[in-house]
Amino acid sequence: MPCGSCDSRAVTPIEVRTKSSYFTRIGIVMAMFLLPATCGIIAGIRAVIAGTSNGLPIVGVAALFGAVALVFPIGRRSWVRYLDDRGVTTRSGRLYPWHEFQAITEQRMRGRYGTSPAVNNYLLVFRSGKAGLFHQMAENDMEVMGAVLSLQRGGPAALLGVPPQAQQASPVAPSGPAPGAHVRAQGPDGNWYPAVVQQTSGGQYLVAFPNGQQLWLPVDRLAPPS
């Protein structure tokens, strides 16, 4: 939930500390890609030196295979590192301020037998981008989940401990939908879906979609049911 008064609140920063076991597992996975890729590149270079025509294709395929290992460290740059009074800072150093916050969504693994009931990670959605919060990979997973539950319950205002009267300082729609009302709501992907209003706070509306996902939205992202 956007919070105009959150930026001035001083709170203890939460650092998402990655478990050492994660680096061990990722190191093993990267080695599974890099070792064969290195052998393939060496074999390809030898083939080129020997004058065979398949040397360069071997080098190219091996290099692409090895490049897969780079997906892990590159993808981790978008993970959340800090949550503080300014907003969310990723491991790449990018800051997403709280006044751009739009939603926190649950991400689940999908397989051949359907979607897993367990939450794999959370995605913090801001107007200018997204940041992944991988609670299961954190040493301080209980602290991180406390932040997640606060964001789900009341957005940044709940996380930062802004009192109710401060939350009400934001504009309140005079004739917005009441809890229990059926509406159409705009999801993070920009599409509109049927939803039910769960609660309201500070001009924001917590809506539940048919798939169980819940988001805090401003009134301009809600519409009467079709």
Image (spheres, rainbow, N blue to C red):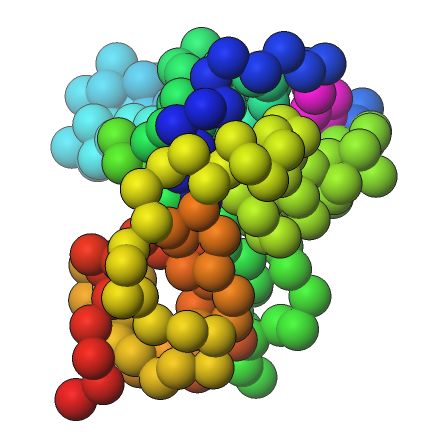
- Residue 35 at x, y = what percent? 56, 27
Give the vertical position of 104 relative to 194 (above or below).
above
**Is residue 68 something that shows in the picture?**
no
**Residue sitting at x 34%, y 72%:** 177
Residue 62: within the magenta?
no
Locate the C terminus and report the quarter of the image it occupies: bottom left
Locate the N terminus and report the quarter of the image it occupies: top left
- Residue 211 at x, y = what percent? 47, 79
Can you tell which quarter of the image residue 43 is in?
top left
- Residue 197 at x, y = what percent? 44, 73
**Residue sitting at x 62%, y 72%:** 116
Residue 98 vs residue 145, the one in the foreground: 98
**Is residue 162 something that shows in the picture?**
yes
Q: How many marks?
A: 0
Q: Which residues are magenta?
A: 14-18
- Residue lying at the far bottom of the rendered structure: 226
In the rendered structure, the answer to whether residue 10 lies left or right of residue 36 reads right
Residue 82 vs residue 171, the one in the foreground: 171
